[in-house]
Image (spheres, helix red, strand yellow):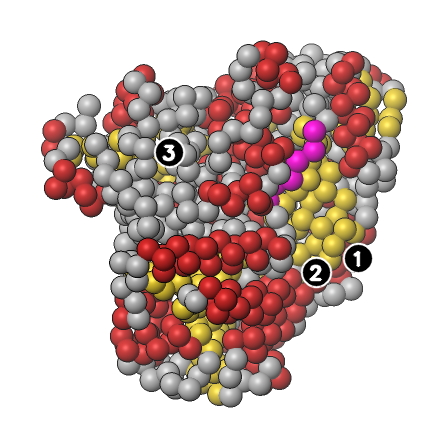
Amino acid sequence: MSQDAVAETITPQSIGDAARAIADAAAQRRAIYSVGGRTHFEYGCPPGRPGIALCTTAMQEVIDYSFRDLTITVGAGMRLHRLAEILAQQSQFLPIDFVFGGDSTIGGMVAWSPPGPRSYRWGSIRDYVLGMRAIDGDGRSFCVGGRVVKNAAGYNVTRLLTGSWGTLALIGEVTLMVRPLPEQRRLWSWSVKGPEELERLLSCLIASRCEPSAIEVIGGTWWDREPVLATVGENGPFRVAVVLEGAARELDGLWDTLWRELTEAELRIGEEIPVESYDRLSGFLAEIPRSGVVYELDVRPSRVVAGLELLSNLRPRASYLAHAGTGKILVFEESGDEFTPEVAAQLRAAVMPLDGRLVVLRFPWSGTWERVAVWGPVSPTGRYMQGLKDRFDPHGILNPGRYVFPP
Amino acid sequence: MVGAENLITRPSELVVYECDGYTLEKETPPAVVFPNSTEAVASVVRVCREHEVPVLARGAGTGLAGGATPLGGGVVLSLARMKKILDISLRDRMVHVQAGVLNLELSSLLSDTHWHFAPDPSSQVACTIGGNIATNAGGPHTLKYGVTVNHVLGVTWVAGTGEVIQVGPEATSAEFDWIGLWTGSEGTLGVATEAWLRLTPLPLAHRTFRVIFQSVEDACNAVSRIIAAGLIPAAMELMDRGILQAVEDAFHFGFPSEAEAILVVELDGIPIALDEQERIVAQLCRDCHAQEIVSAASEEERALLWRCRKSAVGAVGRLSTGYFIQDGVVPRTRLPELVRRVANIGCERGVRIVNVAHAGDGNIHPILLFDERDPDEVRRAMAAGRAILEACIELGGSITAEHGVGIEKLPLMTALFSPDDLDVFWRVKRVFDPANIMTPGKLLPPPPRLSQQDEKNGQPR
């Protein structure tokens, strides 16, 4: 099965249109594949059966922007760069990284909730979705959450739907909490010779009272293409980048604090690199060739160094971006053919002693990949996931095959 | 299963468990069990499920919405004896604790480090981590640091099926956000028995000051303007004249008796940035007719100011023998209108209302005073409480920000959510608690009508 299985595209103009389209599809048991900016359609498993692409990009209006309340409600099809422009006019922003670039839609980001470097300080998009209007697999629309920054009424279904890969409901509209835009962002970087030094540096950065926005470890040949990031690594296999954000004077103070902490720990001081490099870091998934494989290793922050050592032993040609503060290691291999289900199984077994998890996010759809090879063994929560799936999408028409559920 | 020493059935002992901090409805439970392990909790749930006996999880009983009140019978499952600190990993910025650990105990435990657990509900001296998770508890500092769900990395969960599930502390794309769904589910989907909690560095410096206003509306306007100016203080707390009187009687802080409202503003962060922020906040407050702005002169004075704020509700006993505290929330810019309406509701119904508020979040806690011996006063206070929450809904807000629905706000769920929205909640409920034994009759009004499909299948979805 491939993207060709989704030959027909419909583009509803409103949530009502989308609900009718889903109800019609449900009556005919036709599969619906939700798409937005199509910036990460190749992620996850391929469509499980032929169906219709439901494109949300016409639902892109600002429904309410209460900038004094720091909340905005928009159609799910709004692209991230437009959302950022609107918010910037009021010196506000949504503190998530556009990991697939600005053409992604907010609905697409909410549906997957991919983590970015700055989730260390700011949290993930789950922390910013206050409310939602969505449509279940019967075509019934419902509202969850609200437009207030604190809300304890009913179950937090917004969090359930965020990151559910569109398999429970189509997200039609979201209300987001936004934040004042930091005046400045600055980056510092280190080259690190070995795992012991890396561990000492990461321990110091994580214990820092200046709370960096991101603590990234990068490695592999992919980064050699980025001039600034490449020079950072010329003395060692590991390269570390730290991001601080805030007002100009605040940043000076934060860096002074970090400088003192590093000096006390007898660690080298990093060198400041151009801020533009951050976009290359945070948006690297949008840049890499589509033929490659992308997977994530999830470990505790204290096991990131062990995870990277393991990775360099088993997959020496892989490039990675490790969010060292949250323990998520994103790995990219340019040649998808070399990364087989057997390799995934070997890696998965190797990270188990670290209590780690491996999820293959992108792989060549031409290959034969069982669901378990992609997502890992069915977890103890599997039957609850299926229970919810059956109740939200009783005919199994929403993104069949794309996520952990069998098509 | 739990041993005789961990079971109470004597009526004289059971009376303690007849309600939580919401005292208008009470019922003595037939039994209270105190399991001391996750397995024991799971055994209790499984037996209760087999015999279709309701299970009500209870932490410290500090809830204010009746979530732990055993209406309709059932076994009270107290987590109070599960109070072990299982692991502290500062390298991972994480602690692993049992659910009965007290919120404040975590801060004490970490007092020689620069870390803390950020959610700080006013009841933090007594409330448990399990209770915080059940209600998605907040507190004054949620304005900057978020509510409980933002600080939970992992949970050991006993579902209503009796199954034990561990989620986290490592996040993965291969699962739904269970922690997000379970946090705030008020014991109706299952019980958290252990949690991995994220630690936050203590700020390098604070600036805490009290701003005196001649009207509550002026104070609320100042809050709106501070947020609109792009500042996120650590906390912005409002106390009106009524509550100040009680607080002053209790703590003798020295609040001026003529103040109509006091805003406690706390900025935190790096010292060099705080000077500028303090200047802006002070100017915005003056623009809103602030009469006086006084900074806490010492850490002791700051601590006392916070003690006054966090103990404010407890001090209400000096004003009235009976009271209940409401928990409404509106978009921050609607706060001035809401406080006007609260005052009108009190006047119209002849109910004295005093106010504290997490004003920065748009979250008000009006405290309605009454004489418990006077049924008419109680009835009017209840009606006024309901009217306040209806006003919150009208203004685009919600009926609870951090206390939960419990039994107290149950009747308003149908005003806030449509039948289709409530049906979504029931779908979730049935997956985790198919026998409807976990804290039944709370949070969710009875199931909406069966869909055609369900009717055809002969059972609810």
Q: Dots 1 and 2: beta carbons under 8 Å?
A: no
| Segment colored magenta | A140-145
Quadrant where the C terminus of chain A sits is top right
**Within 10 Å of the Cα at label 1, are there few (<14), some (14-19), or many (20+) other Cα atoms?**
few
Looking at the picture, do discs 1 and 3 lie on one chain?
A: no
Depth check: B408 or A37 in front?
B408
According to the picture, the residue beneath numbered tag 2 turns out to be A66
Nearer mark to the viewer, of 3 and 2? 3
- The image position of residue B133, as x and y in percent, is 41, 44
The amino acid type, in three-letter code, at marker 1 is Glu
Specify whether residue B279 is painted magenta.
no
According to the picture, the residue beneath numbered tag 1 turns out to be A85
Depth check: B57 or B459 in front?
B459
Q: Going by the image, does B384 lie left or right of A369?
A: left
Distance between the alpha carbons at the discs numbered 3 and 2: 37 Å
Distance between the alpha carbons at the discs numbered 1 and 2: 15 Å
According to the picture, the residue beneath numbered tag 3 turns out to be B439
Chain assignment, label 1: A
Q: Going by the image, does B118 lie left or right of A194?
A: left
Quadrant where the N terminus of chain A sits is top right
- The image position of residue B317, as x and y in percent, is 28, 66
- The prevailing secondary structure element of the residues shown in magenta is strand
Looking at the picture, do discs 3 and 2 lie on one chain?
A: no
**Which residue is painted at 48% across and 29% down in the image?**
B429
Nearer mark to the viewer, of 1 and 3? 3
Task: Report helix, strand or loop for mark 1.
Answer: helix
Depth check: B271 or A165 in front?
A165
Task: Report helix, strand or loop for mark 3.
Answer: loop
The amino acid type, in three-letter code, at marker 3 is Thr
Chain assignment, label 3: B
